[in-house]
Amino acid sequence: MPGSVSELAEAVQVENPYLLGNATRLKVVLPCSRQEAWRLIGTTQGLASWFPVSVKGRMGIGEMLEFGWTSGTPDRFKILDFKEGDHWEMDWQAGGPGRVRYSLRGEGPVVFELEVTYDNSEEGRKWQLLEAAPWAFYVGNLKSAAMKGPDLRTKDPKVSWKDGFLD
């Protein structure tokens, strides 16, 4: 039985292909055109339809985005890389410096790939494990948005991750 967060992460890595070292990688097939998939992941309006409840800022290298959540204060992120129609990457602070990369692959079907890289430390690994389920939830909500389905996020500010809710 693993004792430390690192040992637990290593044990999970063997059994879970989504947690690879200090990176979480999730993929989903989006049943929509590549243009629509990019609108969902590469525009502030599209992001707000499945991830944070609001996004302020402009998409482009060096630009800052502000993510608003149902509860809590907004978070600010810097865009580190951006290639229109293909991918973009932002900084992510969870247990130390990290990055989140949003990418599209293929055409019919379009595959969305999310890669979250955490600080390679005990604290980074802890955050990686804590955030794995919420990332999976948001990727599922992206697929629902691509299918013109319901928004799976709650609008109740009393429901939060800290209380064990995924939505």
Image: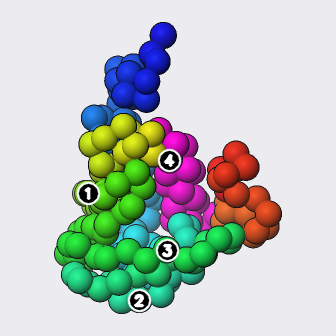
Give the structural element (helix, strand or loop) at label 3.
strand
Q: Which residue is mark 4?
A: 131
Res. 33 image quadrant: bottom left
The label nearer to you, 2 versus 3, is 3
Question: Is residue 11 visible to the viewer in this orientation of the structure?
Answer: yes
Res. 37 image quadrant: bottom left
Give residue 57's mark: 2
Q: Which residue is mark 3?
A: 75
Which residue type carries mark 3? Asp
Q: What secondary structure is the magenta-colored segment mainly? A: helix
Give the structural element (helix, strand or loop) at label 1.
strand
Q: Which residue is mark 1?
A: 105
Q: CA distance from mark 3 to mark 1?
A: 28 Å
Which residue type carries mark 1? Arg
At 50% from the left and 47% from the top, the residue drawn is: 131
Residues at marks 2 and 4 touching, judged by CB atoms closer than 8 Å: no
Q: CA distance from mark 2 to mark 4?
A: 24 Å
